[in-house]
Image (spheres, rainbow, N blue to C red):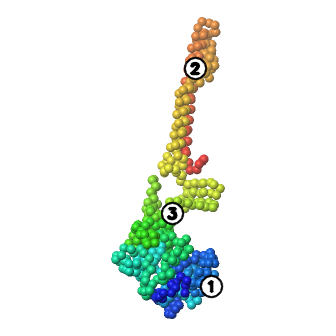
Amino acid sequence: MSILSRVGGSVLLPRQDIASESVGHGRYSPYVAAKVIDFYPDPRLLSDTQKEVIRKSVEAGSLVDRMPINSIWCQVLGAGRLDQHIAYPFFPPHLSLPLKPTEEVWVVYDGVMYYWMCRRVGDYQSEDINYTFVARAANPDPGNLSAKDAFNGSNKNVNSFPQGNTDSIYNSTLGSLNTDDKIIERSASYQTGFTPEAVPRIVRNPGDLVIQGSNNSSIKLGNSINQVGRGIVDIVAGHKLETIPVTNTRGNKEIDKSQAASKDGPTDFIIDKTRLYLAMNDNPDSNFFINIEGIDGSGEGACAVVKSDQVRLVARNDIKIKAENSGASIVIRSNGDIVVVPSSDGKVYLSGTSSDQAYLRYDEFNVIINDILEILSNLQSSIGPGAIAAVEGKTEAESTATAAATAANILPGTPGYDEFIKLQVNIALNAIVQNANFSRFQNINNSKADILQKLQTIKSQKILGS
């Protein structure tokens, strides 16, 4: 007799509302339902005091020192049964199914050991991916109205945990000294390892394989639109919840099971929190509303999409992104280099695909060059190439004037010589200045043309510095 079972008083009679003894005969039916009293993720962390409590409560208490991870302490709910046991997990650790204290579980007895297989599935009004209280379907609630009838509208308090009349052969649970509240109070795994919350139910197609955790995470291997060649793997953490959750009598939120499960949270590529979506043939741009100005959608095909609020890719060495058919790629090397490699005919664009925005931000660079050209123009106007030429060409002008006087037989010291020389110097200087102005003007124009040509060259460059 368990120290948590009822001591004294009327005997706990069997539950007749479930066929938990459906296979086999006698005390040790090989296939029975049981109530989980506690769950042990790692039994080696149990204290000696905790082990002693379990040892005195269960049959084959010696198993407490060698039970594997994910073992449970449970009490059988079969007809005429009060026995409690340690049950090993039926499946190896490769497959570990969710199970919480006070939930009901299927256990198998092989003549030597008990093994728990999986949680019992409740009725529509009790089955919950987060926490299932099967007894809602069979035991009356505190108002002496069956929970099953309550879900048909006779009672508004359907989110309760009725323990039933322990002296009734139809409505008994575990007994007055081993209620669910007491199990929860004593269970470390419930207190520290279980998070009650409202989790959307996933309604699948007949061919889908769905693996769903207790706290709103799932893996779906299915089909996107029920056509050949449309297989998908959809991994989601955080499905949206469409229906309004209810608060149960323990103060926790749970799914409103009076609503159809299909309304809980249909797939939503926009609102679902985090998704890894792999598809044989689908349109990711359409599904995820990916619209980039100037970039055409990729259309349908094999696709992989990662979506979340914060996306991180971390490599201990290199990261490579490659468009296989074009040869274009981006490489982040372990030495810190970031290499952008276009294809042989490709370009690298920033801020759009316009030809004026190739590789460098041409519009910003062009403003700088135009400012430089304006400075050169202002410099030309303020100084004037002719003034520079007049100073530099004075000696040349004087020589030209002297030669002209000699040719005209006007000798120094004769009347009119100085006036003639002055006139010839001015004429020569004007010619020099005009030639200099024209030449420098041509040089500046040529420089402007060269700068503009360089800007056009930058547009066509694919690799920085080429």
Q: Which residue is mark 3?
A: 306
| Closer to viewer: mark 2 or mark 3 | 3
Secondary structure type for disc 2 = helix
The span from disc 2 to disc 3 (Cα, nearest Å) is 77 Å
Could you tell which of marks 2 and 3 lies nearer the N-terminus?
A: 3
Residue 397 tag number = none
Which residue reaches farthest right? Answer: 335
Q: Say which quarter of the image contains residue 390.
A: top right
Q: Residue 240's x, y, as percent? A: 44, 66
Q: Which residue is mark 2?
A: 429
> Residue at image x 53%, y 60%?
311
Secondary structure type for disc 1 = helix
Residue 414 lies, with reference to residue 431, above or below; the image says above
Which residue reaches farthest front? Answer: 9
The answer to whether mark 2 and mark 3 are in CB contact below 8 A is: no
Comparing 285 with 434, the one in front is 285
Q: Which residue is mark 1?
A: 62
> Residue at image x 61%, y 21%?
391
Comparing 464 with 434, the one in front is 464
Could you tell which of marks 1 and 2 lies nearer the N-terminus?
A: 1
Q: Quadrant of the N terminus?
A: bottom right
Q: Residue 10's x, y, as percent? A: 47, 88
| Closer to viewer: mark 1 or mark 3 | 1
Label 1, residues with CA under 10 Å away: few <14, some 14-19, many ≥20: some
Q: Is residue 275 left or right of residue 420?
A: left
Residue 314 lies, with reference to residue 104, above or below; the image says above
> Residue at image x 54%, y 75%?
187
Residue type, mark 3 in image: Val
